[in-house]
C-alpha cells in the first residue's frame, strides 16, 4: 500500500520526503499524536517542528492512535470512545469511519484498538450496552474485526467474545493472533476468534509478590516490535509501610515470538505511565511520568533517572534509538538524549493544545 | 465536558426555589404523564424502575437531573420540584432509615464514610460516598439494574483501581446486588410505619442552638409559620453567637416525607441552605445549614419545639468551666424557672437573672470540683455542665481534611477546609485514648501549617498550597498549573496543620493532616 510521490501533496512530500526513501539512516523521525479539540498532530521530531495538523470530523476528544503498517492511515478513537476515524495522512481525508453505537445499543472502547500486521483488519475491543426503554443492559464485551477497506460507515465483518477490562490489543507480527491485555494476557486466533492461549497476570504465582497492577493505556511498540508497560506489585512478605513494600517492573510482550516477560527493576519510587523499548537495543527501556527513567532490562535496574519539567504521559523514540520523545498530558513534546537523558529540545504544539491521554506513535515509511 | 451535570443550576436550587409561590403542579400527574412515556405502567399499575425504588428528596432530584441530561427528558423546574416532592413523600425513606447516613444529606465536609465492609468500600465507595448507597432502597433485581446503569454510563469503572483487578461486573451484578438487596431492601417495616404517620407540622417557635466551626457556638429562636402551599413554611432566625454577635435570617422551608426539612434563605450576610430532620415525635430538629455554593462552610443545628407548660435546655454557654473560676453561664432554653440544681462543688452566686428562655447564672466552681460532665437542672429542664482543671490535650478536627484549589478563572471555586481545636481531658486513668476520656469542646486557637513529610518538603507544598485566612479556615491556592513550582504542578500540598491553644499558663498543640488537592468536577447534592 505504499503510495507514490505523485499522489502526495507538495507540502507533505517535503514533510515525509526523508522517510519515503526507506532505509536512510539519517531519516527524520515523525511522531503522530492527537490533541484537543479533535485533531491529529504530525511532528517532525528531528527538525523539532510541528509539520501538520489534521482535523478529525465530528465531535470528541481523540485518544488512542493506531497506524496502518505502512503508516499511511491513522485510526483514532474519538466521539466519546464511540467512533474510530481513519485519516489518510497524505490527503488529510477521513477514509475510514466506524461509528460503533447504533440506536438502542451504546458501544464504547476505552483503550484497546490495533491494526493487523498486514494492515487489512482493524481490531477494536468493544463494550456494548443495550439501552432499553427503562434500563441499561450490559452486554458481553467482544473484539470487533473491521475490514480496513470498509471506508466510511464501516461495520464489523465479525465479532468474537473477549473478556472485560481489556486495555490493549496488540497484533502478532506474523499475523494470525491478536493479544488482548487485561486481567490476564489473552491470545486470540483472529481467524476463528477462539482464545488460543492465556498467559497469567492476575493469576500469576510469584513468590512473595501480589498480583500485578497494570493499566497499559499507551501503545508504542511499532519500532521495536516489543510492547512494554509498567506493573506494580506488593511484597506479601513485608509490612505495607515498609519502603520495600511495593515493586515496580516492566511487563514486555514480544510481538514476534509471543513471549511475555516481567522484569522487576526497583522498589516503587516514582509513578510511571508509559514505557518504550529502544528499537536498536531491546534490553533498554525508557519510562515516563514526572520523571524520565532509563531502565536496564538485562540488569533489572534503573540505569538513570531525571526529573522532567512537568508531567508527560506518553513516550517514544527515534528509529536510531538516539532520542527519546515525551508527550501527552499538556501541550508540548520534549526531546531527550537516550544516552545522557540530557534535554535537547521542546516542541510546542500549536496553541498549546492538550494531548491528554493520546497515544504518540512513530510514523514509519 | 459537555456531559457534566450542572448540579448547582439544575438540582440544589431547583429543590427549593419558589417554594412559597409554588404553582399547583401535581407531581403525581407528572409521573403518570411525562415519566410514563418510557416508564409505562404495567397491568399492576406499577411504573417499571420508578415503582421499585425509594429515595431521599436529593436522591430523587439527582435521578430526574440524570433523566434530563442523559435522556433528554423535557421537564420544567416546577414539574421537577413537584415530582421530587411527590416521590419523596410516597417513596421516601423513614427517619430511622436515613439516620446512619445523614452526613451525606447534610453535606458535612471531611466526614469519614463508613461502608459496612471492605468489599462494599471497594465496589461502591471508591467513587462516591457510601451514604449515597445507604440512602436508597431497592430489591436485589433493582440493585442489579443499577449496576448495569453504572457500567453503561461509566465504562471506566472496569479500568480504574479496584475495578481492573477483579471481574467487577460479575461481582457487582451478583454478590453486591444481593448484599445491597439484603441491607437496603425496598419493603421495610420502618417505611410502612412511617408512611402511615401524619406529616409533622413544624409551625411554632423552636429554641435552637449549635456551632458554626470558625464562628463559634450560638443559640437562638427559629419561628416557623405555615405558608400557602402544602408542607411549606416561612421561617425566621434570631441567633446570638457566644461572643455576642447577633444574626437574623429569613427563609422558606419545605418538608418532604413528613420530616425532611429543606430550606433556603439568608442568615446574616450569607445565602444559606438547610438540611434538617424533624424528630419522629415532632418536637426535635437537627441537621446542618450551609452557605449556598460553598457547602463546606456552615453550622450544625439542633432545636427543640417550645411547648407551653414544658421546659427544655438547648445550650449552656460556656458549656465547660474551669475549677477555681467564678464565671457567668448562660442557659438557653424555654420554660426555665426555679433554682438550679448544680453539680457538686459548683455554687450559684447571687440570683439567676433573665427570663424563661434565657437565664444567666453566676457560678463559683470550687477548686476541688470533679472533672467531667455533670447534670445541671432547672426545674424539669436538664442539661450538663463540664468541669475541668486543665486541658490535657488538644485534638484538631477533622483529623484528616481535604481542601481543593480553585478559582483563577476556572469554573470551580476553591474549597477551603475549616478546622477546630477540641479540648480533651484524659479522664480518671490519666491516659489519652481510653474510654474515660472527656471531650470538652472547641476552644480558641492560633493556626499554622507546615509541610507534612519529606515529599511535601521537597516540593515546598506549604509555600504554595494556601494559607490560614481566619479562625481555623484554610484557604487553598488558585487552580491550574503553577509555572513557579517545580514540575509546574498545581498548588496542591500535603500539610500538617497545627492548632496552638493557651490554657492558663500551659500551651498545648494539636495536629491534623490536610491534603490540598485538585478540583472535584462533579458535585451532586449527595456526593
Image: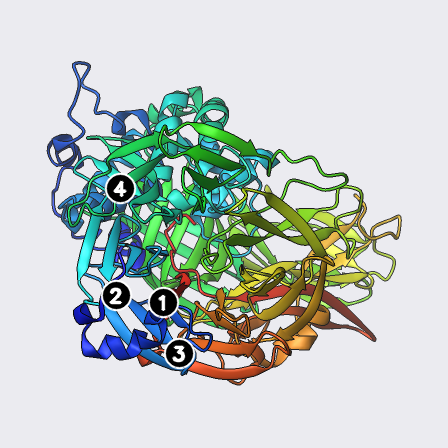
Which residue is disc 3 drawn over?
Answer: B408
Q: Are marks 4 and 3 in contact (CB under 8 Å)?
A: no
**Alpha-carbon distance for marks 4 and 1?**
22 Å
Disc 1 is placed on an element classified as strand
Mark 2 surroundings within 10 Å by alpha-carbon count, few (fewer than 14), some (14 through 19), many (20 or more): many
Q: Quadrant of the N terminus of chain B?
A: bottom left
**Alpha-carbon distance for marks 2 and 3?**
39 Å
**Alpha-carbon distance for marks 3 and 1?**
33 Å
For discs 4 and 3, the disc positioned in front in the rendered view: 4
Q: Are marks 4 and 2 in contact (CB under 8 Å)?
A: no
What is the chain identity of the residue bearing mark 2?
A
Q: Are marks 1 and 2 in contact (CB under 8 Å)?
A: yes
Which residue is disc 4 drawn over?
Answer: A146
Which residue is disc 1 drawn over?
Answer: A32
For discs 1 and 2, the disc positioned in front in the rendered view: 2
Disc 2 is placed on an element classified as loop
Q: Which mark is residue B507?
A: none
**Alpha-carbon distance for marks 4 and 2?**
20 Å
Q: How is the image coloured?
A: rainbow
Residue B107 position, x and y percent, is 45, 53
Which residue is disc 2 drawn over?
Answer: A89
For discs 3 and 1, the disc positioned in front in the rendered view: 1
* Mark closest to the chain's N terminus, 1 or 2: 1
Disc 4 is placed on an element classified as strand
Q: Are marks 4 and 2 on the same chain?
A: yes
Amino acid at each position: 500500500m505504499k503510495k507514490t510521490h505523485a499522489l502526495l501533496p507538495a507540502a507533505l512530500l517535503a514533510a515525509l520526503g526523508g522517510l519515503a526513501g526507506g532505509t536512510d539512516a539519517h531519516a527524520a523521525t515523525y511522531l503522530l499524536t492527537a490533541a484537543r479539540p479533535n485533531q491529529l498532530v504530525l511532528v517532525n521530531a528531528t527538525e523539532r517542528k510541528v509539520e501538520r495538523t489534521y482535523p478529525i470530523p465530528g465531535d470528541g476528544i481523540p485518544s488512542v492512535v493506531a497506524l496502518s503498517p505502512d503508516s499511511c492511515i491513522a485510526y483514532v478513537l474519538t466521539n466519546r470512545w464511540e467512533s474510530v476515524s481513519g485519516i489518510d495522512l497524505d490527503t488529510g481525508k477521513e477514509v475510514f469511519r466506524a461509528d460503533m453505537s447504533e440506536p438502542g445499543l451504546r458501544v464504547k472502547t476505552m483503550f484497546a484498538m490495533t491494526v493487523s500486521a498486514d494492515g487489512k483488519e482493524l481490531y477494536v475491543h468493544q463494550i456494548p450496552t443495550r439501552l432499553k426503554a427503562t434500563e441499561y443492559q450490559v452486554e458481553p464485551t467482544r473484539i470487533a474485526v473491521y475490514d480496513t477497506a470498509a471506508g466510511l460507515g464501516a461495520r464489523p465483518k465479525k465479532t468474537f467474545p473477549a473478556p472485560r477490562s481489556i486495555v490493549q490489543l496488540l497484533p502478532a507480527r506474523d499475523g494470525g493472533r491478536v493479544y488482548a491485555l487485561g486481567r490476564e494476557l489473552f491470545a486470540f486466533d483472529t481467524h476463528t476468534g477462539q482464545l488460543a492461549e492465556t498467559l497469567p497476570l492476575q493469576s500469576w504465582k510469584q513468590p512473595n509478590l501480589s498480583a500485578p497492577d497494570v493499566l497499559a493505556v499507551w501503545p508504542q511498540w511499532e519500532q521495536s516490535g516489543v510492547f512494554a508497560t509498567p506493573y506494580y506489585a506488593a511484597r506479601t512478605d513485608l509490612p505495607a509501610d515498609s519502603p520495600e513494600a511495593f515493586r515496580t517492573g516492566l511487563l514486555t510482550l514480544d510481538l514476534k515470538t509471543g513471549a511475555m516477560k516481567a522484569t522487576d527493576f526497583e522498589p516503587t519510587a516514582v509513578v510511571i505511565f508509559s514505557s518504550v523499548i529502544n528499537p536498536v537495543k531491546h534490553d533498554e527501556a525508557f519510562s515516563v511520568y514526572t520523571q524520565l527513567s532509563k531502565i536496564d532490562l538485562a540488569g533489572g535496574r534503573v540505569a538513570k533517572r531525571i526529573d522532567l519539567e512537568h508531567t508527560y504521559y506518553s513516550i517514544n523514540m527515534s528509529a536510531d534509538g538516539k532520542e527519546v520523545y515525551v508527550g501527552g498530558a499538556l501541550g508540548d513534546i520534549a526531546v531527550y538524549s537516550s544516552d545522557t537523558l540530557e534535554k535537547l529540545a521542546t516542541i510546542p504544539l500549536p496553541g498549546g493544545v492538550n494531548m491528554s491521554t493520546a497515544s504518540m506513535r512513530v510514523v514509519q515509511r | 465536558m459537555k456531559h457534566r451535570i450542572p448540579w448547582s443550576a439544575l438540582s440544589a436550587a431547583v429543590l427549593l426555589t419558589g417554594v412559597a409561590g409554588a404553582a399547583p403542579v401535581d407531581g403525581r400527574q407528572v409521573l403518570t404523564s411525562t415519566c410514563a412515556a418510557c416508564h409505562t405502567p404495567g397491568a399492576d399499575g406499577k411504573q417499571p424502575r420508578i415503582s421499585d425504588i425509594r429515595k431521599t428528596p436529593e436522591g430523587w432530584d439527582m435521578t430526574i437531573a440524570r433523566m434530563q441530561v442523559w435522556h433528554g427528558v423535557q421537564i420544567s423546574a416546577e414539574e421537577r420540584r413537584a415530582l421530587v416532592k411527590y416521590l419523596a413523600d410516597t417513596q421516601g425513606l423513614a427517619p430511622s432509615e436515613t439516620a446512619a447516613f445523614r452526613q451525606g444529606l447534610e453535606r458535612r465536609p471531611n466526614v469519614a464514610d463508613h461502608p459496612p465492609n471492605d468489599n462494599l468500600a471497594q465496589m461502591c465507595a471508591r467513587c462516591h460516598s457510601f451514604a449515597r448507597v445507604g440512602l436508597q432502597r431497592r430489591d436485589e433485581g433493582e440493585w442489579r439494574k443499577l449496576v448495569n446503569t453504572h457500567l453503561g454510563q461509566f465504562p471506566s469503572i472496569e479500568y480504574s483501581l479496584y475495578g481492573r483487578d477483579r471481574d467487577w461486573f460479575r461481582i457487582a451484578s451478583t454478590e453486591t446486588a444481593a448484599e445491597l438487596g439484603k441491607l437496603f431492601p425496598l419493603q421495610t417495616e420502618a417505611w410502612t410505619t412511617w408512611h402511615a404517620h401524619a406529616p409533622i407540622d413544624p409551625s411554632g417557635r423552636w429554641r435552637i442552638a449549635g456551632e458554626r466551626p470558625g464562628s463559634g457556638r450560638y443559640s437562638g429562636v427559629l419561628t416557623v409559620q405555615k405558608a400557602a402551599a402544602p408542607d411549606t413554611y416561612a421561617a425566621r432566625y434570631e441567633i446570638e453567637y457566644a461572643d455576642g454577635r447577633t444574626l437574623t435570617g429569613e427563609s422558606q422551608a419545605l418538608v418532604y416525607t413528613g420530616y425532611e426539612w429543606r430550606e433556603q434563605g439568608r442568615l446574616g450576610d450569607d445565602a444559606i441552605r438547610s438540611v434538617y430532620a424533624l424528630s419522629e415525635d415532632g418536637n426535635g430538629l437537627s441537621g446542618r445549614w450551609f452557605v449556598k455554593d460553598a457547602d463546606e462552610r456552615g453550622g450544625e443545628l439542633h432545636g427543640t419545639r417550645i411547648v407551653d407548660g414544658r421546659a427544655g435546655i438547648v445550650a449552656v454557654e460556656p458549656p465547660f468551666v474551669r475549677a477555681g473560676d467564678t464565671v457567668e453561664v448562660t442557659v438557653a432554653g424555654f420554660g426555665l424557672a426555679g433554682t438550679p440544681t448544680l453539680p457538686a462543688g459548683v455554687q450559684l452566686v447571687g440570683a439567676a437573672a433573665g427570663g424563661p428562655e434565657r437565664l444567666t447564672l453566676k457560678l463559683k466552681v470550687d477548686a476541688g470540683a470533679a472533672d467531667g460532665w455533670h447534670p445541671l437542672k432547672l426545674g424539669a429542664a436538664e442539661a450538663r455542665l463540664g468541669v475541668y482543671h486543665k486541658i490535657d490535650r488538644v485534638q484538631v478536627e477533622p483529623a484528616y481534611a481535604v481542601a481543593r484549589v480553585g478559582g483563577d478563572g476556572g469554573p470551580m471555586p476553591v474549597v477551603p477546609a475549616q478546622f477546630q481545636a477540641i479540648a480533651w481531658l484524659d479522664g480518671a486513668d490519666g491516659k489519652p485514648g481510653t474510654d474515660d476520656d472527656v471531650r470538652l469542646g472547641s476552644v480558641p486557637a492560633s493556626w499554622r501549617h507546615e509541610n507534612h513529610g519529606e515529599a511535601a518538603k521537597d516540593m515546598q507544598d506549604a509555600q504554595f498550597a494556601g494559607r490560614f485566612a481566619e479562625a481555623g479556615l484554610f484557604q487553598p491556592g488558585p487552580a491550574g498549573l503553577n509555572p513557579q513550582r517545580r514540575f509546574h504542578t498545581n498548588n496542591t500540598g500535603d500539610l500538617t496543620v497545627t492548632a496552638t491553644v493557651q490554657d492558663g499558663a500551659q500551651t498545648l498543640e494539636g495536629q491534623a493532616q490536610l491534603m490540598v488537592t485538585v478540583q472535584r468536577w462533579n458535585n451532586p447534592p449527595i456526593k
